[in-house]
Amino acid sequence: MLKTVFSQILIDLGELEGDYRAFHLKNDIAQGTITIGIVGLSVLGALGTDFILLKDNPQLFILMVCARVLFALVCAATIWAMGRIEKVRNFDLLYMAWALLVIVSVILFKFTRPVNYLTSSFDVIVPLAIYMLSPLRLKSNSILALVFSIGTIYVDFVFGTDLDPMHFEVAIAAQVIVHALGLGSASQMQSYRRQSFRAYIQEKDAKEVAAYLSNIDPLTQSLTRRHFFSIAGSEFLRFTRYHRPLSVLVIDADNFKNVNDTYGHHAGDVVLKSLSLVVLEQKRVQDTFGRLGGEEFGLLLPETNLEQARIVAERIQRTWDETPSKMDGDLIHSTVSIGVAETQPDDKVFDDLLRRADRMLYKAKERGRNQVAAE
């Protein structure tokens, strides 16, 4: 029932709830640290009031001093532990334990006060502070505030037998009002923060989609030339730094103009998409496949020497030769020529490697196409 009520009050983030809490964990820790620090200092500051009220009972006053100092030490230890928390669940458990300790301590302190010593303003401020300052979920804060209100009313009006019964009705009304105000204000603040987080995630996702689309060739689903060369540059830097093998394949569809002239440009698009699919199925996860322009593609092979790259190229050439493209019931047969090159110690930039692969491509064309040439 509580879950249903709070889901109607707050914006429901659904599957994003865990991400939302993790995203705000550092802020929640900072807020919790400030709150605990203020409470700890306030408890120590109340020693002056204890002295006034308990000056005729020095033993009880000494006991109160010890209790308040111990509580301040607990607050300091909680702050120390909170600064080392990395999981939302651990933070919630720690803060909830500390908050319950505070509530129980405040209620127990009431027994040290005179029977007619009503702290009505304090009893109203505490639930409101829980709603407004606690970084826990709204449901948890509501439970903490209710526990405090029930406990403090019980102490004041069950043990305080000499109190005017009218005060009971006033206190109940004050607690109802403060809970309504606190719940409404806290729900608005948390809903705003949730709405902001959802807007942030939507904007982030939109940017990622836009970035992805800008790096993908819309026809072949391979990388664009710009993005391919960006990754190739990074891989070449890794080669120059660690001297790890790096090879590249330049793949070109044979007689592609004839396909366009015979079957039309739509058929040419079908052939390019089919060729791209074949290469994507043959490549490894760490390999980079991109469209260099027109019917020419590049396949970057990290941690791959020339002989290994030749094997990959021959597998792609053979698979494509055996995979005709289908369009309107017609089978369009096409072949590819592939140039293969491996980095050499005197290479200065990636273009040095790519030029050698291009030369091998043209050599494969000169030899009659539908084959692999490697240097």
Image (cartoon, helix red, strand yellow):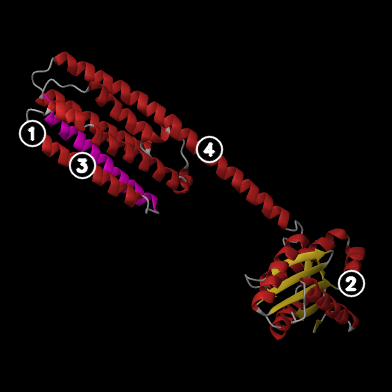
Tags 3 and 2 touching, CB below 8 Å: no
Q: Is residue 151 above or below residue 287?
A: above
In the image, 299 versus 263, the foreground residue is: 299
**Comparing labels 3 and 2, the label whose residue is closer to the camera:** 3
Residue 11's label in the rendered image is: none
- Report, in whole angstroms, how far the alpha carbon at label 4 lies from the one at label 2: 55 Å
- The residue nearer to you, when weighing 99 against 53, is 53
Q: Residue under circle 4?
A: 196
- Residue position marked by numbered label 3 in the rendering: 69
- Residue type at the position of mark 3: Val
From the image, state whether disc 4 or disc 1 is nearer to you. 1
Nearer the N terminus, badge 1 or badge 3? 1
Left or right of 177 in this view: 112:
left
Secondary structure under badge 2? loop
Is residue 267 left or right of 49 when viewed as pictured? right
Q: Is residue 74 above or below residue 51?
A: below
How far apart are the alpha carbons under marks 4 and 1? 54 Å
Mark closer to the observer (1, 3): 1
Q: Is residue 231 visible?
A: yes
Judged by depth in the image, the label closer to the viewer, 2 or 1, is 1
Q: Is residue 327 visible?
A: no
The disc, 4 or 1, on the residue closer to the chain's N-terminal end is 1
The 10 Å Cα crowd at callout 2, few under 14, some 14 to 19, many 20 or more, is few
Chain part drawn in magenta: 87-114
Task: Determine the residue positioned at 66% across, 75% down.
Answer: 241
Dot 4: what SS?
A: helix
Q: Of the two numbered discs 2 and 1 on the same chain, state the one appearing first in sequence.
A: 1
**Three-letter amino acid code of the residue under disc 4:** Ser
User: To which residue does mark 1 refer?
Assistant: 58
Residue at left offset 40%, top offset 31%: 186
